[in-house]
Image (cartoon, helix red, strand yellow):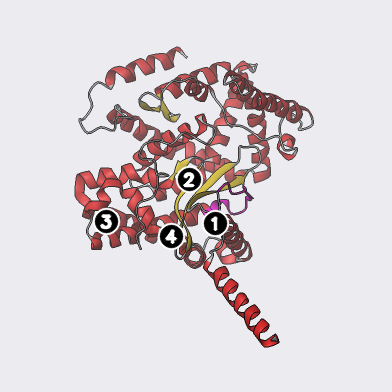
Amino acid sequence: MTNAIRFVLLSCLLVSGSIGAQEPTPPDVLVKNVTTEVVEIIAKDKEIRSGNRAKLIEVIDAKVLPHFNFGSMTALAMGQNWRTATPEQKKQLIDAFRTLLVRTYASALAAYSEQKFDYRPLRAKPTDTDVTVQVRVIQPGAQPVPIDYSMEKTPSGWKVYDVMVGGVSLVANYRTEFANVVRNSGIDGLIKDLQTKNRVLEQKK
Amino acid sequence: MNRLVLLLAVLAVSGCATSPDADPRDPLEPMNRAVYKFNDTFDEAIAKPVATVYRDLLHVEIRSRVSNFFSNIQDIFIGVNNLLQGKLQDGVEDWARFAFNSTIGLAGIHDVASDMGIEKHNEDFGQTFGRWGAGPGPYLILPFLGSSTLRDAGGTAVDWYVAPLQHARPIALRNTLYGVYLINTRAELIEAGNILEQAALDRYVFQRDAYLQRRRSLIYDGSPPRERNDVNDPPEPSVK
């Protein structure tokens, strides 16, 4: 009898345990944890603070990138042109765009990581699969800068597919640029432009 | 003021010749790009170097006092604009900020109001016109001032016309205040400028789109109604 109860209890635990594992970290908690962790790493690391960009990018690669869906970001920035791209072109676009965004993100982080962050309560239903997580950067003597992360629920957890800084959507902002280049020199032209841009930035360091 | 009106008239006339695949929001692109280039040259040669020296010379504490001083004066008309837009509570908060910061905050150099939880707002006449229903009109690059639109240029003209600094006397004092204000403002933008340079394939286009998005967001105080083709519409199928 006691064995039977024990068995039932144990299987309940196992089942609830596995359900718990399937339910991903809520998006607002995820954003807060990752931001806090990265800011702490920067605060402790003398090399990054004195301008070691390569090391900062390593940190971003390890801690931040897994939570971004660069496929969605690139598709949204490409708009209509995404459908006409070949799988190989898509792969190259995603790679090049990711490199550019990471570098830009590193610069922004290096410049603003000492500010205070204010995490807004998430306004979403538990069933939502597309939410906006709002963070605000507090700066003395100026209106706080809102940073909104658009996030979608995927089988591998919540992923960011757009970032809005002060009301400016990063993805929307690249849409005109990308469309202009594609109109003039095709998708391969855009890939080349992005790669060239990345190489120039790489050399500048 | 008169000069600005004249400038706008010239801009409007010179904008007649446009290429067929021009962005509908930016019919004056060829001329805007010329002014952009002029501004860029001026910035590289004079404004940015001066702002960089200013930044390196003065400790961040002092610079933030300077920012606070000007920010405090602007709260008066931020309040006026909030009232004009029917946002009574925001307007009263702006004036409360001005009252606290001008007194306890020692002529505004300490932003005690923010510490008390009275938040700073961002308003100007361009936003008020937008709130009243004025569309942005064609995108404009103003000499020295940079990104604007027809509506916002009109707003900026009113902003400058009513600005308390305008009435500072003697004239030498007024000019000094303006000089410090402009250098300090440029110094605040050094980091942002570097990031823009990194992020953009075509800086002109990137900056234009960011400006137009930003203004739209500001007019609706951070939550603009969704547009067709908005990025926030359901995302396309995920791509791995």
Q: Which residue is mark 1?
A: A27
Q: Is residue B17 left or right of residue B79?
A: left
Secondary structure at badge 4 equals loop
Chain of the residue under label 2:
A
Taking depth in this image into account, of A12 and B229 the one nearest to the observer is A12
Mark in front: 2 vs 3: 2
Q: Which residue is mark 3?
A: A191
Taking depth in this image into account, of A5 and A138 the one nearest to the observer is A5
* Residue for point 65% across, 84% down: A4
* Marks 2, 3 in one chain: yes
Alpha carbon distance from label 1 to label 3: 32 Å
Secondary structure at badge 3 equals helix
Q: Position of residue B142 (x, y in %)?
A: 41, 26
Residue A201 in sight from this viewpoint = no
Secondary structure at badge 1 equals helix
**Residue A118 included in the magenta stretch of the image:** yes
Q: Which residue is mark 4?
A: A205
Chain of the residue under label 3:
A
Q: Which residue is mark 2?
A: A164
* Marks 4, 3 in one chain: yes
| Circles 4 and 3 in contact, beta carbons < 8 Å | no
Label 2 vs 3, first from the N-terminus:
2
Taking depth in this image into account, of A29 and B55 the one nearest to the observer is A29
Alpha carbon distance from label 1 to label 2: 16 Å
